[in-house]
Every structure is written in C-alpha cells, then in structure tokens.
Image: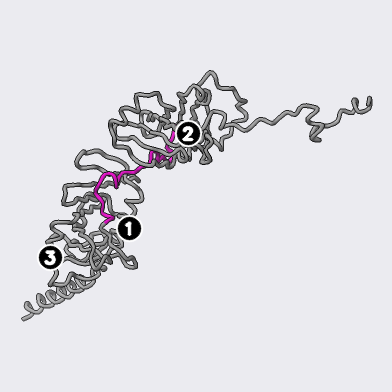
Amino acid sequence: MRRLIIPAILFIVLGLGTMFLLSNPEKNNSSTYNSTDVSSFHIEDISIVGKIFIADRGGNQALLTLEGNTWMYTNMATNQKYRARPDAVRNLLETVKSIRARNPVPKPAVDNVVKTLAAISNKVEIYDKDGSLIKTYYVGKDADEGKGTHMIMEGAERPYIVDIPNFIGSVHTRYIVSEKDWRDKAVFRINPKNLEYIQLEYQDPSQISHSFKLSKVQPDQYEVTALSDLTKKIDPSLFNNDNAATYFEDFNAVAAEKIVYNKQLRDSIITATPFLILSYKLKQKSEAQYIRVYGIYNPTADRGDGLPGHRQKLQRYYIDVDDNHFFLVQHLVFRRLLWGYDFFFRKAPVVLQEDEARTTGEFPENKESSTNQ
C-alpha cells in the first residue's frame, strides 16, 4: 500500500506543476522560451537574440546577425553582406519583444486562415547568441480589419490574431526581406574612437591646396598635415585640437539619399576624374578604405529668382566605394565633411595699421609724436 501512495503523490505534484506552467506561460524560464507554447510569440529578453532569419513565399530570404555591436544583413541569394538599417533592426526587435497573442482565430475561420498563411506569409526563425533556435513562426497579413496580424507557431494547428498592446495596426510590415529595405544607406557609420586618420585629396585644380591628412596621435590629440605644395603654411601653434575632434565626430553617421544599383551608370561615372578622394584608416583594419566622390553639376541652376547661383550648381554627389557600394548623397548632408587644411587652425590676430588703429581707438597714441604736434 505504501509503495502505491508515494508514486501517486509524485504524479499529482508533477501534474499540478505542469498545469501551472501551461496556464502561466510568463512564468516559464525566460532564458529557454518554451517554443511548444503555440500562443507565445514574443521574447521578453531580446538581449539574448543573436540571429534572425526571415523568408517569404516568393523565395526572398534575409539573414540578420549580430557581429560585435553591429547588426549585419546578408542577402541569401547573392551571399553579399551589408550593415543593416539600425532603425529597421530596432523596429523588428521591439516587435519581437512586444507582440502578444490577443485571441485564437475562431474555429470556422481556421481553415481559410491556414490556407492563406501557407500561400502568403513570412517564416521567422529567431536564434540566441549561441546559435540555438528559440522560436519559429509564420507572419501573415492583416487581421481584424487591420488591427492585428495573423500568425501561427511552427507545428501548431491553430493560428492567432497577434498585435502589440496599445498599438493599432498590423506588424507584418516589420518582418521585411528585401535588400533595399534592409541595407543601411549610411556612407559612414564610424565610431570616432576607432579612427586613426582621415585624408582628403581634392582633385579639382582649384581645390588641391585645401588637401590634408588629419591623424590621431594620442587618444585626445590630433595633428594635421598639408598634402599640397600649394598650401599656404600656417603657424602650428594656431592648431585647434577641438576642431579636429569635431571633424572626427562628423563621421559618426553620414547617410545617403539612396543606394544606386545601376551598374551601367556607375561604370560611366567612375571613368571621370573624381572631385575628391577620401580615405580613412580604422584601428581594427590593416588597410585604409578609399572613397571616390564625384560632383553632379547643374550649370543652368538658379537661386529661384532667375539669377545663377553657385551653390545651386552642385546639389548632389555620387560616392563610389566598390561594385556593391555606390551612393547618391545630397550636398547639404555631405558638405560638413568638405573641410580644408586651414579649417583646423585658429585665425591669426589681425595687426592693424597705425592710421586704421587710431581711427578705431585700438592703437595707443605715441607720446613723442603727440608732444611734437
């Protein structure tokens, strides 16, 4: 009798524990995220996420991987890897954390919704930083008149209407797969602490004298070197270290208007002499990166009043890095990088002529001359 009582008690305890976990999915261990819960689509602690794979029914696939502190996007069709758009990654991770199953799809509609998901949906696989699969689910289209999204967990039989609390709308648009949607349009996204030097070599004859190389010689100390014999020499004591630090910081984020995919256009542009060759060296890289900048001129530009305007003639640049990185950038965005050698120096004090100084009251009267008068 005693032998029967003990197993019975254990059976009851284990049964109650299982019922508790199933009825309280939020109480599950947050590091394991029980994938068998067909209504738990979210991941509370997104800091454990290290890889996300998304594929649509048309064969498009996107792989996002966290490398260091940077999320990278890989086009699975071409195997090309690029920086992922930070805002798109942020939206996706916030969605992964915030989505909740509002209610299961009513039984009469299950078959139709499942068929739609089978034809039109994005498959989502989420992995932790160790490469272990956390969740797999399918994201469909709008539900409940656009107030939610149809989603179903892999292996489940019944889909759910999923939404983000206090957010009205569908979330399927955040699970994007195309390269144009995922690629970061930033030409530069550099941590200034990682920069060793920046060099600007102007190719335009009228600008050559402004060419320079700005180097970091200490963590907070810089030096600038003129690259042309035509450059007017400036007293080194007038060097402004704060200006140099500001210039390095300007490379933190410089965004393009768009990424240009037209190979024929690129091939035609790069045959010309660039306006500028910009190079920079990162601490973690063995070689410098070279970028060629081509100005887009509009000789008929005017200021809006029918009169010619110099600034309006140059409104955009093509920026060429390599075959896979060709950008169109607005002048208003890029001009903050177009410094010259003399920009890194304080202006020398103006020495006033005697007649001018007396007029302005900034020149002390000569006692001897005033006595003679």
- Extreme-front residue of the structure: 306
The picture places residue 21, in percent across and down from the top left corner, at 21, 70
Mark 1 to mark 2 CA distance (whole Å): 43 Å
**How many residues crowd mark 3 within 10 Å: few (<14), some (14–19), many (20+)?**
few
- Extreme-bottom residue of the structure: 1
What residue sits right under mark 2 in the picture?
Answer: 313
Question: Which badge, 3 or 2, is on the more N-terminal residue?
Answer: 3
Q: Amino acid at mark 3?
A: Asn
Pointers 1 and 2 in contact (C-beta within 8 Å): no
Instruction: Kindly report which numbered mark, 3 or 2, lies closer to the viewer in this rendering.
Output: 2
Q: Residue at x 27, y 39 (%)?
A: 81
The picture places residue 256, in percent across and down from the top left corner, at 39, 40
- Extreme-top residue of the structure: 229
What residue sits right under mark 1 in the picture?
Answer: 94
Most foreground residue, 93 or 69: 93
Q: Amino acid at mark 1?
A: Glu
Q: Which structural element holds mark 1?
A: helix
Question: Which badge, 1 or 2, is on the more N-terminal residue?
Answer: 1
Q: Amino acid at mark 2?
A: Lys
The picture places residue 160, in percent across and down from the top left corner, at 20, 67
Most foreground residue, 85 or 259: 259
What residue sits right under mark 3 in the picture?
Answer: 112
Q: Residue at x 79, y 31 (%)?
A: 357
Question: Which badge, 1 or 3, is on the more N-terminal residue?
Answer: 1
184 versus 343 height, above or below: below
52 versus 15 height, above or below: above
